[in-house]
Image: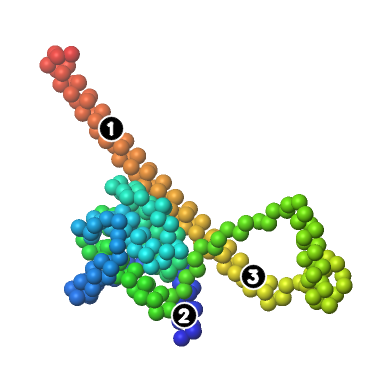
Amino acid sequence: KNGSKSRVRLAAMAVVAVVAPAIESDEDLQRLYNWVDETSLSRPKRNISRDFADGVLFAELLNHYFPRLVEMHNYSAANSHTQKLYNWNTLNTKVLKKIGYQIHTQDIDDVCRAAPGCIERMLKVLQEKVLQMQDGQLRYRAPVANVVPRVATAGSGLRDEEERSVGSRANGRGERGVSPAPPASGRSKAEKYQNEVDAELLVEKEQRIVEMREMVDIMSEKIKKLEQLVRIKDAKIDAMGQKLQKYGLV
């Protein structure tokens, strides 16, 4: 049992993106819709495939159950395919990997196109993660708050000296300026935690690089299509000019 919980806790560190499985029955689908309706969202749900296509409502659901993981200002309502992709990739990188879920690129593409049935499959996976969290089977690490450095001020040196002196006397020592070293176990725990944070930051940076490359590929493809349209229009203009010359209109 402890081993399975450890595996769940480590899921966010190493998780493979797979296409979300199909929903087995109409009863399961209706229960899923009821579950979604339990959360108050910013937009009314009319057509669930279109309503969730930009990822904003999905982010709101995540924010309801995992509020410390989601920063809603990162997600804006979108009509363009590029912005929708950005929202979903941001969710994948900043939030979902921490709860052991990575949306497959095929599902991201389908949900952005509002493909029927896609968002329901993804919501079902999210529902299962929420249930694991509520049952205590899923542990996740919330973002680490930035530590504010201690700034030296006038008189701080005297206070520090007094604190060290009090500490040394409490330990039966009369030496000033000597403070006991932290326990070795405490240092090892701190180092282990720092290593985990560094590994997570590294994974996040690598994922960001992948995202940026995907965005570059998308923009390059759009540029190619625009160049192709320009060539087609130039060809039409040349053909029209030739017709005008043929009939002596220019």
Q: Which mark is first along the chain, 3 or 2? A: 2
Separation of residues labelled 2 and 3 (CA atoms): 22 Å
Does label 1 or label 3 sit earlier along the sequence? 3
Per the model, the C-alpha gap separating discs 1 and 2 is 59 Å
Label 2, secondary structure: give it. helix
- Mark nearest the camera among 1 and 2 is 2
Tell me: residue 136, above or below residue 80: below
Give the amino acid type for the residue marked by disc 2 in the picture.
Answer: Lys
Who's the residue at 76% across and 51% down the image? 154
Quarter where residue 148 is shown: bottom right
The disc labelled 3 sits on which kind of residue?
A: Ala
Q: Which mark is residue 231?
A: 1
Q: Are marks 1 and 3 in contact (CB under 8 Å)?
A: no
**Occupied quadrant, residue 35:** bottom left
Q: What residue is at 58 percent from the left and 63 percent from the top?
A: 198
Measure how far apart labels 1 and 3 are at the Cα level.
61 Å
Q: Is residue 165 left or right of residue 232?
A: right
Q: Is residue 18 visible?
A: yes
Q: Amino acid at mark 1?
A: Arg
Q: Pick whichever, 169 or 27, lies toward us.
A: 169
208 to 119, vertically: above or below: above
Q: Secondary structure at mark 3?
A: helix
Q: Kindly give the residue lying farthest to the bottom in the view shown.
A: 1
- Mark 3, residue position: 190
The disc, 1 or 2, on the residue closer to the chain's N-terminal end is 2
Q: Quadrant of residue 219?
A: top left
Q: Are marks 1 and 2 in contact (CB under 8 Å)?
A: no
Residue 115 visible, this orientation: no
> What x and y, as percent, mark residue 44?
24, 57
Colour mode of the rendering: rainbow
189 displayed left or right of 46: right
The residue under label 2 is 5
